Amino acid sequence: MDRHEDIQLKALETLSHEDLNSYIEHVKNSPWRQKYHIESVFGALNAPAAIFYDAAGGFYHLFYTWLPLLDEDEQYWYHVTSKNLAVFDNAGVKLKPDTLFDSGGLSAGSAVHINEENHLFYVGRADTRGKSTYKVLAAVMDPDYKLKKHTVPLVEGFEPYYRQMKDPAMVVSEGRYYMLIGTETRDGRGRIAVFGADESSTFNHMGDLDTGFDEFGWLWEYPGHFTADGRDVLVFCPQGVDRYGDFFRNNYQAGYMIGSINFEDAVMTHGEFREFDAGFDFYAPRIFTDKAGRRVMIGTLGMPTTTYPDEHFHVRHTLSVPRILEAEGDVLRQMPHPDLRELRADEVTALGYFKHYNKRMRDFYGDAYELIVDFNEYDASEIYLHLRVGKRDETRLIYEVKEQKFTLDTSFSGEQPEGVEEFDRSVRLKEPLYKLQIFMDISSIEIFINDGAAVMSARIFPEKDAIGVELATQSGQCYVNLTRYDLKPLPHEEIIYQN
């Protein structure tokens, strides 16, 4: 038996110092270790759990659910901090599945500042005699950034109504506290359960949020809520939604609806459900407010049902770059957070035409960079941008001018994940293509199209020689301005626990 397979049978707390170092060294051998994206020391970074800015200390605090052992499901909360939203430092495990109420694992959750303290909320699962029970639990952060669990559950007794409960989002509205909890009902329907309370009362079950959706997936995960231009934005991740044209092509979806919520009546009127990302691997987003008051989103680059090549090195998933959200009508525009400019180094620019012959941009080669492409004018029928080009690999970006259709094709992007149906994703633009802002890392790509009118993300696993950049058209020519920056790596401290 492989040594790493053998120690997967142990809980994190029973791993020796030698075992931990073995895992860490195993991860270091991965050819797809990210440079400037948040990744776990080892194991699975499952999803962002809670994110907030602490004005008193001047730090952002990001917690994510962590599975130290890939084949287990007892989630921990791991902590990273940042003075900005570009450079993050590991701070270690802060919540463990170590009580009667959460011995089966901790879900994602949310954070609220109450009475000068930061309170964090999550659902704990306990497995007894083959049955799972769920309770909403809370913890408070002390000045040393340690979390102390409350001894009494906030909400319990879900089992008559729901098969699963997870990922509570705390909402404060008109002096009342509401919890939105992702659920699967007893008859297999995705819903958001609503609980309400004031400061002096316990939380009461107010029913399921009435969205008018009767059949829309069998489980709704990672609910969230914020307001934009005086309207309510409801965020959630439905599992089991049927594919429709270019929409809902991934196994699970992450999206939002804009409208109006009456929390006391648990009713929402809204527009259509829209996906955040038209690519492959964006899931489980968490929304928070930055120190300038802007709404920001960070999600997981990874799908729960997909098996990725880097799992051979005992690591799974990475977080997205932070995105600012702005409402425009009934849609959200997403832009890279300006703090990411702190990572920039070694600017390279070029201005000129290209046509149907492949134009190799040697000064732009690399495996971790930000690339901005401004399309000044074109009379081409199709425009091709090939990235991470090597002897056998290339990631293809294709724009069909007449149809205003943009496609991300990962068919030749290297070693392929398992569990993915088809290796192309497309989005139709409302305006002709005029700008791309691309964040490339060792094993991911995030593409912001037309100043965030659409976003496409994917995990890719090319060979080491795949660093080329090529431009071409099917016919006609294209005049562009290119700007490229190297992006500085994160420190990636190898911290499991921190005093």
Image: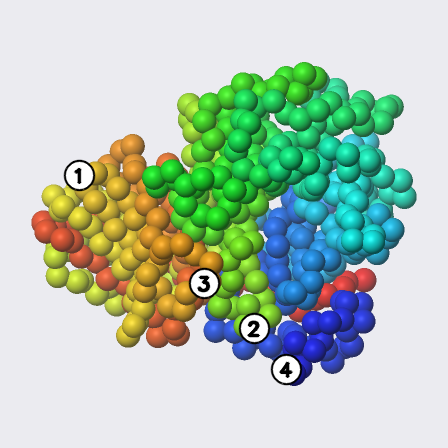
Classify 10 Å Cα crowding around label 3: few (below 14), some (14-19), many (20 and above). Answer: some
Task: Give the quadrant of the C terminus.
Answer: bottom right
| Label 3 sits on residue | 417
Nearer the N terminus, badge 4 or badge 3?
A: 4
Q: Nearer the viewer, residue 245 or 281?
A: 245
Q: Residue at x 31, y 68 (%)?
A: 393
Callout 4 secondary element: loop
The residue under label 4 is which amino acid type? Asp
Give percent across and percent down for residue 57: 72, 45
Circle on res. 2: 4
Callout 2 secondary element: helix
Q: Residue at x 85, y 39 (%)?
A: 153
Image quadrant in which you'd find residue 384: bottom left
Circle on res. 452: none
Task: Give the quadrant of the N terminus.
Answer: bottom right
Q: Residue at x 70, y 47 (%)?
A: 107
Give percent across and percent down for residue 299: 54, 47
Q: Nearer the viewer, residue 298 or 240?
A: 240
Q: Does residue 315 sit above or below 156 in this rendering?
A: below
Image quadrant in which you'd find residue 406: top left
Nearer the N terminus, badge 1 or badge 4?
A: 4
Nearer the N terminus, badge 2 or badge 4?
A: 4
| Label 2 sits on residue | 313
Circle on res. 402: 1
